[in-house]
Image: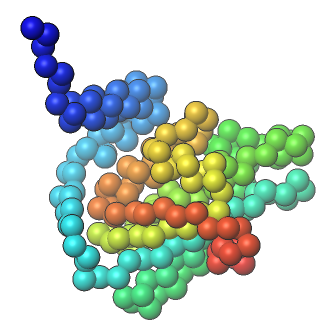
Amino acid sequence: APAPPPPPHIFFFHAIMVFQYRLWSRGLVDVYKRQAIMRDPPTRIMTIRQLRRPPVAVASDAQVEPNAPPGAGYIIWDAETQRLTGVYYTHGDRELGILNTSMDDIAAGRQPIARCECAVLPTALFADPQAFAGRDVIWFVDNTAALCGIVKGTSREPTNERLIAHFWAAAYRLNARIWLEYVDSKSNWSDGI
């Protein structure tokens, strides 16, 4: 008689194992970052009922124009503390190098908007960790390429894949549960910064 098929959860864990191996073996997260992520892992609290604290709402956006350095920003609204934070920054040559682009590339018509949109998310987590630590977060993104990669946890574009890995590693370290949502560009309330 043929052997029975493995239980469904075996396929799920195998897929996770393959993804993790691919991520680590490509060198996307170097040894030091792996050690930092796995050292003192936070206790994960997974609730199946609504938390008593309201979620933090975040909207982020980026812009790339041919004759100006790319800019990006985000707005964080915490209904619990009534704290509203808005941050805008531009990418200098160093940051553009990290994003694997340059002003010459932009002037030549290469559009790094998905990279800039992806970069906003880990930037916000690293820049303002106290706003996200232990919280539920609803995050609005208006770029479908960036959003799909972040939701999937991977991207075919290596720079975006690194940014996505950093984003989810930071969310894990902060014990933040993040729900990502698409918002139309005209309705994105972070567009004004």
- Quick one: which residue is furthest to the top in this view? 1
Residue at image position (58%, 59%) is: 120
State left or right for residue 34 relative to residue 73: left
Q: Is residue 154 above or below residue 23?
A: below
x then y, percent, for residue 32: 36, 38
- For the question of whether residue 88 can be seen, the reply is no
x then y, percent, for residue 179: 43, 63
- For the question of whether residue 156 can be seen, the reply is yes
State left or right for residue 59 relative to residue 2: right
Nearer to the camera, 113 or 184:
184
x then y, percent, for residue 26: 46, 26
Determine the image quadrant of residue 78.
bottom left
- Quick one: which residue is furthest to the left in this view? 1
| Colour mapping | rainbow
Determine the image quadrant of residue 92.
bottom right
Nearer to the camera, 20 or 186:
186
Residue at image position (32%, 54%) is: 172
State left or right for residue 45 relative to residue 18: left
Q: Is residue 89 above or below residue 1?
A: below
- Quick one: which residue is furthest to the front in this view? 1
Determine the image quadrant of residue 155.
top right
Q: Quadrant of the N terminus?
A: top left
Residue at image position (38%, 31%) is: 19
Q: Quadrant of the C terminus?
A: bottom right
x then y, percent, for residue 173: 31, 56
Residue at image position (31%, 46%) is: 37
